[in-house]
Image (spheres, rainbow, N blue to C red):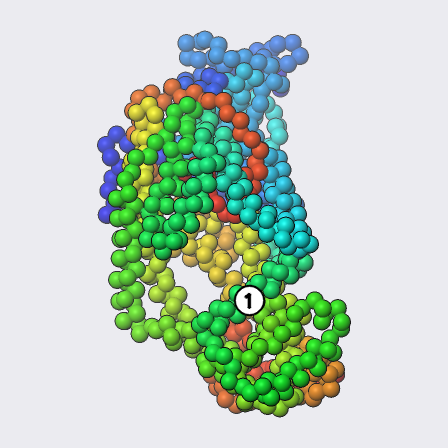
Amino acid sequence: MMGDAPQLRGLRGHAYAARSSYRQPARLLTREGGEDLWVDIQNDERAVLASAYLSDLRVDPPLGTAPRKVTFPDGAVFETTDHDAIEALTGKTRGSLLHHYESFNARLIGVVAVCLAAAWVMWRYGLDIMASVAIAFTPPAVIEQIDVGTLQTIDFTMAEPSRLTDAQKADVNKVYRRLVQSLPQDVQDEHSFQLLFRDMPGMGPNAFALPGGTMVMTDAFVKDFPDANVMAGVLGHEIGHVVEQHGLKRIYRSLSMYILIAFLAGDVGPILEDVVLEGNVLLSLSFSRAQETSADEFGLSLSDASGFDPAGLKLFFEKLDEEYGDQEPPQWQSTHPSSAERVKAIDAYIDRL
Amino acid sequence: MSESLPQGAKPFDFTGNAKEWFGIWIVNLLLSIVTIGIYSAWAKVRTKKYFYNHTYVEGRNFDYHATGKQILIGRLIVIGAVIVFQIITAVLPILGLLLLIGLLFIFPWLIVRSMIFNARMSSFSNVRFGFVGTVGQAFLTFIVYPILTALTLYTTFPILDRAVKRFSIDNHKLGQARFNMEVGLGPFYKAFLVAIAWIIVVGLVGVVVTGFSFNEFAYAMDNADRAPEQAMKVMGLFYLLFFVAFLPAAFLYQALVRNAVYNNTTLEGGHAFASNVTAPQLLWLAVTNMIVVVFTLFLMLPWAQVRMARYLAAHTGFIPGGSMDDFVTQQQEAGGALGDAYTDLEGIDVGLPI
């Protein structure tokens, strides 16, 4: 390294005095000083602005073509864009290797491939793990609060009090309790299973579950499908959503994705930020379909275990298919598998029960 | 539409390039993934340093001095605190509620810590920035004003926005020289009303032309299970209206406010700033950036970031009122990166408004 010293005469750049914005053209000069190399900053009038042993200098790691900074013990700074000369002076510094791998060349294709693969793995498995961890850390009070809040919104915007008679409600509740009681005891304790009735003219025959375990059934459902087996199938399906925590998983998956992108990729800029947060909906469609299938299977085994005919769920979908089958979009755009598809899957599952 | 910067204004210059930044960015990404996020602290430093180092005014550039270790420690403390908080809420809900109220008071403190840290870790022409805002001011700006703004149904939003910008700019220093923003409420309200006018006019025209109705929208959403095609159609229409009515309005507001703020900000020593961004250009950049980034699976993100940085720099000017050699760093403790980690997590931007 010392042999290089003569060529380093006149390593040009700019100098700043310690803690000052005073900037002047300067050179970095080296001379032998015993064991170490002695380094001076000299301005154009040949005045020495600062000097120190090479080993006492702080050299910033290289970062692209950004100017390199050399800080002297007294705080004086020498700055240069002569990257080769600085490297010749200091040799390989901390960060040189990183800098080498960051340079734009064919090797980066491999890095890109690994990143894309990792991103896919993270989307496929990592998000589920993050969501499960987050669910484990979510206090039950918060989940119940989600239910309360959602229900208030529904009541405010689209639901009327139920017009069903107490007897009708009691019939459904009997089916519901029988299903819940077939669940393992610890699962029963974990969620507050509660069935509510609402008159929701816009929704037709329908039932849905909120993340905390609250379930809502529309009046139209009770009127259109009084058969206990159909009810058991649909309620079992909704209980499946709750027990397998599908709602929470979807919420946390979207959030995790947002956090991952923000922390790993960095600032994505305006608009795209919103798209990332909302656009998850599109990406999670297939995830949602998997949840529906999984809830179907859960509902079927639960109906079967509680002594109902699991074919009830099939009847429900067959009727839906009759009424709406021709309007269904291709599977990939929908959050739910098509009804015909589900009937087939249900048949296959019942055979295995 | 595009006014030129005033006489004597030297435009900022961003000299970074997409190719070089891509290499740094993708390696940052890879190392962050491989180390399950730990490297992201160092990645943040390299990112900020890259963009600061390549931003020049009058041949002098900015620099960022925090170390990855500082950032990592800050993040670990914040994550630890969040976990402890979650456990407490799960075990003792009432204590959790008290802590939540406590957070209301810690929040302004964290913001101030974060701004001090970021200012102290940033420099221009070898002189460090400083931040002298107090927790009391932050409490007013980030807790009291937002509550009052909500109570007035956001009609006083321009007042809040001005307070936030004032808090940030007036409390920043370059060395010992203070920044000062002298803008009346007029420009803020003007920007606000222009944006509202856009939403109303375009929204009305859009609804009339497309025959969109909110009842239909709500109905289709409720029936998404059984008539998804209909829901998709209405949802698409809703997003289209949202994009043409709200997005340009947001950009109109931001562009007008940014120009007003820069054109009326001075730095002690007779220096001043200027800005001439326009809403159509900003919107065009943002929309095209988004499309390109999405269709290249985020691989063109570095290109988009450089493109935006270049535009903003070119449309920001510095009007020197004298020598740039007279700034001197003022001693101030930077504190830890705790506040910085917190604002990172919450997505609050407290960096220098370059």
Q: Horizontal and vertical percent for residue B214? A: 37, 72
Instruction: Give the residue number, with chain letter if any, for mark 1.
Output: A148
Q: Is residue B77 above or below residue B245?
A: above
Left/right placement of residue A231 relative to residue A71 reads right
Q: Nearer the viewer, residue A159 or A287?
A: A159
Left/right placement of residue A286 relative to residue A49 reads right
| Residue at position x 30%, y 45% in the image | B188
Q: Is residue A32 above or below residue B243?
A: above
| Residue at position x 34%, y 28% in the image | B267
Q: Is residue A287 above or below residue B123?
A: below
Q: Nearer the viewer, residue A165 or A300?
A: A165
| Residue at position x 56%, y 25% in the image | A59
Q: Is residue B224 above or below residue A118?
A: below
Left/right placement of residue A230 relative to residue B197 reads right
Count residues near mark 1 (Cα–Cα under 10 Å), then give few for <14, some for 14-19, many for 20+. some
Question: Residue flagged by tag 1: what amino acid is it?
Answer: Val
Q: Secondary structure at mark 1?
A: helix
Q: Horizontal and vertical percent for residue A283? A: 53, 64
**Does residue B147 appear in the picture of this structure?**
yes
Chain ID for label 1? A
